[in-house]
Amino acid sequence: MKPAFNSWAEFFAMGGYALYVWLAVAATLLSLLCLWGHTRWQYKQLLADIQRREAREQRIQQANQAQVEHAKNAARPQEKQQ
């Protein structure tokens, strides 16, 4: 089996097409890096949104429970003071 390039210099020169080859490699890697970064950013945004929604639901439940307790206390007849 014969190697395609005899030296590292030939490998990096890519048979005279180095500019096109390495620009394509750079564009591909840059695109993948941007996609990865955007995906991580969206993931963090999604987690933050879920946490905000859960906190809101918890506050709503606490407010509803407080209203129920207040209604129960208001409905009780007041004891006569002696």
Image (cartoon, rainbow, N blue to C red):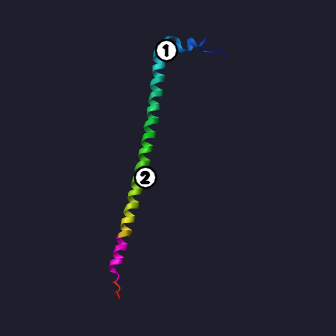
The answer to which of 21 and 59 lies nearer the viewer is: 59
Q: Callout 1, which amino acid? A: Ala
Q: Classify 70 as above or below 9.
A: below
Estimate the spatial distance between the alpha carbons at disc 1 and disc 2, rounded to whole Å: 49 Å
Q: Quadrant of residue 44?
A: top left
Residue 77: quarter of image: bottom left
Of residue 9 and residue 72, the one placed in the foreground of this image is 72
Main SS, magenta residues:
helix
Q: Earlier in the sequence, mark 1 or mark 2?
A: 1
Outermost residue to the front: 82
Q: Quadrant of the N terminus?
A: top right
In the rendered image, residue 2 lying in the magenta stretch gets the answer no
Residue with the mark numbered 2: 51
Q: Few, some or many C-alpha atoms within 10 Å of disc 2 (few <14, some 14-19, many ≥20)?
A: few
**Residue 80: percent from left, percent from top:** 34, 87
Give the magenta part as a residue range: 67-76
Please name the residue shown 38% across and 57% down the image.
56
Q: Which residue is mark 1?
A: 18
Local crowd at mark 1 within 10 Å, few (<14), some, or many (≥20)? Answer: some
Front residue of 45/24: it is: 45
- SS for tag 2? helix
Q: Which mark is residue 29?
A: none
Name the residue: 32% across, 78% down.
Answer: 74
In the rendered view, would you say 43 is above or below 1? below
Q: Amino acid at mark 2?
A: Gln
Q: Quadrant of residue 55?
A: bottom left
